[in-house]
Amino acid sequence: MTEWQTLKLHEEAHVLTITLNRPQQKNAMNQLMVNELRQLFENLAERRDLFAVILRGQDGNFCAGGDIKDMSYDPETGSELQQKNLVKANRNFGYLLQAVNNCRLTVIGILEGAVLGGGFGLCCVTDLALAHEQAQFGLPETSLGLIPAQIAPFVTLRIGLTQTRRLALLGMRFSGQEAKELGLVHGTFTDEKDLDVQLEAILKKLRKCAPGANAVTKKLLLQVVNPDLDAVLDQAAEEFAQALMGPEGVEGRRAFMEKRSADWMKL
Amino acid sequence: MTEWQTLKLHEEAHVLTITLNRPQQKNAMNQLMVNELRQLFENLAERRDLFAVILRGQDGNFCAGGDIKDMSYDPETGSELQQKNLVKANRNFGYLLQAVNNCRLTVIGILEGAVLGGGFGLCCVTDLALAHEQAQFGLPETSLGLIPAQIAPFVTLRIGLTQTRRLALLGMRFSGQEAKELGLVHGTFTDEKDLDVQLEAILKKLRKCAPGANAVTKKLLLQVVNPDLDAVLDQAAEEFAQALMGPEGVEGRRAFMEKRSADWMKL
Amino acid sequence: MTEWQTLKLHEEAHVLTITLNRPQQKNAMNQLMVNELRQLFENLAERRDLFAVILRGQDGNFCAGGDIKDMSYDPETGSELQQKNLVKANRNFGYLLQAVNNCRLTVIGILEGAVLGGGFGLCCVTDLALAHEQAQFGLPETSLGLIPAQIAPFVTLRIGLTQTRRLALLGMRFSGQEAKELGLVHGTFTDEKDLDVQLEAILKKLRKCAPGANAVTKKLLLQVVNPDLDAVLDQAAEEFAQALMGPEGVEGRRAFMEKRSADWMKL
C-alpha cells in the first residue's frame, strides 16, 4: 500500500477525498506532491468502485501554486542540467492537469483560501467546482516575470479566450464570488455547513448516474472541445524555463524577495 | 406531396412552423419521427422563399427524448442484427441534429414542458431559442445506464465544456429560467401571449435581413467553431449501443420499470 | 517618421493611445485607415518599451464600420478588376483584425457611440474592452444584403457560437450594457471621468506584469483556441464580394439609399 507524504486520503461510501497536505505552505505543490498526485490520479482509472473524487486542501487553503523553492535559478551558476530540469518539472505539472482532466471518475473541487497559479490550474480541470465566497483566486505568474505555462491553456478551455486574456494579462486577483460569475466554478458556499449540504445534494444526484456511463460520457465531452494540448504544453514548458532564467524572471524574483515593485522598463 | 405522420406543418408569411405531433408520448421521437424530421430539414435547402423555421411541440411539451420502446434489448435473445440496428438508429438521430444545425434557414425553437434527452439535443441546434420559464430541461441518460451519445457533443458546442460536464455527469434537471442563465436558450416567456409578442419582434428583425446573406453568414459561423463531428458521432453511436446492451443499461431499464433506484455498485 | 492621415497617436508613460480620426464619418474605416492601422499594428511588434495600446475613436464614436463608398458596385458596368479589388479590400480588413488580435502588446479598447460592423470586429480582438453603457453595437451587414465576412469569425471566437448566431442572423443592435452581458466587453463606464478611474486601475495592474512574459502568455492563449482562420477568411472575402455584387446586395444598397425596406422575397 502506498504511503503518501503530501496527501491525505479518506474513502467513504464510494467517494474518495484527496486532501493536499502541506498546510504550512498553503498546500503549495512541490515536485513530490505533483508526483504523488499524478500517480494517484493515473491509478484511479482502475477504481470501478468509486462514484467520485473530492479534491481539496488542508486547513482552509486549496493550493497556493507551485513551490517558489523549485523555481530558483542563478543565471551565473545555472547548468544545462538545471535548465532541463526546469522544463521537465514544469511539463510534469501539465501531465498532472491532463490526468485530472481525463480522470474517468467525476472530480469535485472544493476551493477555499488560496487558489493561485497551479492551484487555479487544478480548479480548471474539475468536473464540478464549489468555491468559498471569499476564496482568493489569482494568476500571479507574469507579475513575477514568469508565465502560466501549463495553466493558461486549461483556463482558456475552462472560461474561454475573452475572459482568460484579461485575467492572465492583468495578473488579476478575485474572489470565489467573481469566480462563479466568470464560470470558473459552478457554485459558492459560505461555510463548512453550507458546503456539506451542497455536497450531499451533489453526491445524491451523482449516485443515481451509472458510473460506467458517466465515464464514457465524460470522455465524449472532452473529445469535442479538447484540442491535442501535448504540443502546446511541451512548448510552454520550454518558454516557462526561458522566462524563469531570463532577465524578467530574475528581476521578478529579486523584486519579490526585496518586497519592491519590479522595474520592467529598465531591463 | 408528402403526408407527415408525426409532424404538423403550417406556413404563413414566409415562415414555416413544424410541430412535433405525438402529444400522447410528450412528442418523444420514435424512428419514424426522426426520419420525417430529417427528410423535412434536408429538403428545406431548396426553400428560398422562407425567412425562418419555427420548431415546437404539440400540446405544451417540446419533446421528451427518444422513445423508450426503441431502446429495448434482451441480452439473452438479442441478435447481431438488433445490435447493428441500435447503432444505426442512434447515429440517425445525430444526422438529424446535424441537418438542423446546418439548415440554411434560421431555426427558432420554442421550448415548453418536457425538453429531455433528444429534445434537449434539438434545442442545442437552433439559431434562436425561447423557453417557457417553467420548461423542464434534463439529460437523464446516465441515470438509465445510457449515454447522451449524439446529444452531448451539441450541448458542449452550445454552452461549453465547463457547464456541460456538470449537467451531463449529474443527470441535472432544471427550469427554462436556468436554461437561460446557462446560455442554452436566448430568452424566456411566461405564457403564449408573451411568446407571440416576442416572436413577432424576432420575425420583424429577421425579415429585414437578406435570406441569402443570412444563409452564407450562418455557414461561416459554423465553420469557425464546429469541429468535424462525424467521427465522434459514429463512435458515440457504437458506445450508446454498448451501454444499452451492457449491465448498466439492463439494470437501468429494470430499475426504471420497477420504480426503484438502480444499484450500480452491485454490478 | 510616419505621418498618419486617419489616425492620431499619443504616447505617455509607456502607453500608446491610437485614435481613429475621421469623426465626420463616425470614424468609418476607408481603405486608407485600414492600411494605416495595419501598418501601425504590424510595426508594434518591435516596441519593447510599451505596456499597452489603447484603441479608441475621435469625438464620441468608436467606429461606424466600413466606408459605404468603398462598397459601391454597378453590376452593369462593374469590371473583373473591380471585383478582384472588392475581394482584396475585404480580406485586407481581416488581416488587420488578425494583426490586432496577435499584437504582442496588451490592447485595450474604449467603445463609445457607434460600434458597428468593422468597428464591432475591432472590439472583438482587444484584450480588454470597456464600453460606454449607451454605446450602440450592431452587425447591420445582412440587412444591407451583405455578410459580416471578416468579422463574424472573430465574434464567434469572442462570445461563442450560440450568441453569435442570434446576433448575426437577426442583425441585432444593442447597448454597451448588453455587450457586457453578452461577454463582448469586460466592463462598462458612464462618462469620461469614470473611464479615467477605471483605466488608471487597469494600467496599474498591467504595469506590475512583465511585458515580455505577457507577450508569451498572450501567444499561448491564442494557440489554444484560435483555429487557423486564413482559409475561412479567404473564402469569406470571396463570398462578401459575391453578396455585394449579387441581387441582394444591389437591392440592399438601393433600399438604403431610397430609405425604404428591402423587398428580399421579390428577388
Image (cartoon, coloured by chain):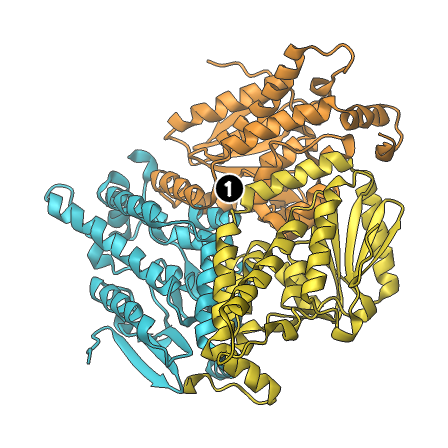
Chain colours: A cyan, B yellow, C orange
Measuring from the top left, give residue A132's x and y in whole percent.
Answer: 47, 72
In the rendered structure, the answer to whether residue B173 lies left or right of residue C254 reads left
The chain under label 1 reads C
Measuring from the top left, give residue C44's x and y in whole percent.
Answer: 43, 27
Q: In the rendered view of the protein, which quadrant contains the C terminus of chain B?
A: bottom left
At 63% from the left and 23% from the top, the residue drawn is C21
Label total for image: 1
In-front residue for pair B264/A245 = B264
In the rendered structure, the answer to whether residue C41 lies left or right of residue C209 reads right
Tell me which corner region of the image, top left, top right, bottom left or bottom right, holds residue A124. bottom left
Tell me which corner region of the image, top left, top right, bottom left or bottom right, holds residue A109. bottom left
Tag 1's secondary structure?
A: loop
In the rendered structure, the answer to whether residue C214 lies left or right of residue B218 reads left
According to the picture, the residue beneath numbered tag 1 turns out to be C127
Q: Where A16 sits versus B120, above or below?
A: below
In-front residue for pair C12/A54 = A54
Measuring from the top left, give residue C85's x and y in whole percent.
Answer: 62, 15
The residue type indicated by label 1 comes to: Asp
In the rendered structure, the answer to whether residue B180 lies left or right of residue C103 reads right
Q: Where A214 sits versus B9, above or below?
A: below
At 55% from the left and 19% from the top, the residue drawn is C35
At 57% from the left and 41% from the top, the residue drawn is B223
Can the viewer see residue C208? yes
In-front residue for pair B28/C92 = B28
At 81% from the left and 52% from the top, the residue drawn is B2
Can the viewer see residue A261? no
Tell me which corner region of the image, top left, top right, bottom left or bottom right, holds residue A59. bottom left
Measuring from the top left, give residue A156's x and y in whole percent.
Answer: 46, 51
Residues packed near mark 1 inside 10 Å, few (<14), some (14 to 19) or many (20 plus): many
